[in-house]
Image: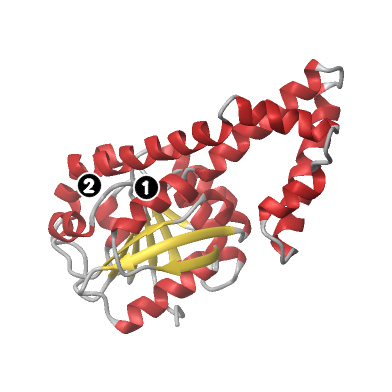
């Protein structure tokens, strides 16, 4: 489906790089089918060295003759990108935007292009373990929807939604989600060091515990509340820790943090 298709990545930062890694790892395209554009020459050089893809600092050059264009720039520079690309994208090309907060109507109008997918992947995509939530404008064809699905499946799991509001929700929950997990890992490692482990020992213990716990939860037919209860023996050490977290309103802190990210995603859409 993507044979002989040219894919352009406009803005090749962390998430753009993750997507390039994902599509190449699954062999759905060859390095020669990809061109990455970024204003930073060092970023371009690094991508060329790592993946063997073509690179440029010129967005118009990247989009020329490209059948699929992945827009992964920062929301703050989106209007500048619009000024450069508006009207320069081939009419039958597909644009996949992963720009946080940018609405379909804004993208369609700003690019002067009808076929736009709005998507929110996350960084585990670079090892094929990501999850992407996506939807499209009315101008997206059935074939282009299938192409989007193939690309996103190369990054992990994908979920199509009919209402665009879920993209902002996904931005807060899964797009930003890895950072929440990494912060918890950092805190748990620091706690291990505080009680006497070396940092190296604490990191190995925590990383292995997190990986094993998630893998077990994914394979188990029981819900996570039941799994937590299995570990939490009455009067035991785990109960002491869990009771402390509950007393400190851990659930509310997490919920409020996700809500803050969600509100910021909405604000970014309003600014654009």
Mark 1 / mark 2, whichever is N-terminal:
1
> Circle 1 is placed at which residue position?
11
Percent coordinates x, y for residue 112 in the rendering:
13, 61
Q: How is the image coloured?
A: secondary structure
Question: Residue at 67% across / 59% down in the picture?
Answer: 223
Is residue 243 placed above or below 197 in the rendered structure?
Answer: below
Percent coordinates x, y for residue 122 in the rendering:
50, 51
Q: CA distance from mark 1 to mark 2?
A: 10 Å
Do tag 1 and tag 2 residues touch (Cβ < 8 Å)? yes
Q: Nearer the viewer, residue 55 or 14?
A: 14
Q: Nearer the viewer, residue 180 or 29?
A: 180
Residue 170 appears anywhere in the view:
yes
**Residue farthest along the front direction in this orientation:** 234
Question: Residue at 44% across / 78% down in the picture?
Answer: 2
Is residue 25 placed above or below 225 in the rendered structure?
Answer: below
Secondary structure state at the residue bearing disc 2: helix
Q: Residues within 10 Å of mark 2 (few under 14, many from 20)?
A: many
Q: Which mark is residue 81?
A: 2
């Amino acid at each position: 489906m993507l044979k002989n298709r040219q894919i352009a990545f406009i803005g090749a930062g962390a998430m753009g790089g993750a997507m390039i890694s994902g599509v190449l790892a699954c062999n759905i395209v060859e390095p020669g089918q990809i061109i990455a554009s970024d204003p930073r020459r060092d970023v371009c050089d690094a991508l060329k060295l790592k993946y063997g893809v073509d690179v440029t600092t010129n967005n118009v050059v990247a989009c020329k003759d490209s059948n699929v264009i992945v827009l992964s720039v920062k929301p703050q520079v989106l209007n500048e990108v619009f000024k450069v690309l508006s009207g320069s994208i081939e009419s039958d090309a597909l644009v996949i935007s992963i720009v946080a907060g940018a609405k379909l109507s804004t993208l369609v109008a700003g690019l002067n292009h009808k076929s736009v997918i709005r998507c929110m992947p996350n960084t585990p995509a670079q090892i094929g373990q990501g999850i992407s939530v996506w939807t499209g404008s009315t101008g997206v064809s059935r074939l282009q929807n299938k192409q989007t699905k193939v690309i996103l499946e190369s990054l992990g799991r994908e979920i199509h939604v009919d209402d665009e509001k879920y993209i902002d929700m996904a931005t807060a929950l899964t797009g930003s989600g890895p950072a929440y997990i990494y912060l918890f890992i950092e805190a748990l490692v620091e706690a291990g060091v505080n009680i006497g482990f070396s940092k190296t020992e604490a990191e190995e213990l925590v990383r292995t515990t997190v990986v094993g716990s998630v893998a077990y939860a994914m394979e188990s037919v029981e819900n996570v509340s039941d799994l937590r209860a299995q570990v939490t023996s009455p009067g035991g050490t785990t109960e002491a820790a869990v009771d402390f977290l509950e007393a400190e309103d851990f659930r509310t802190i997490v919920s409020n943090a996700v809500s803050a990210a969600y509100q910021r995603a909405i604000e970014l859409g309003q600014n654009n």
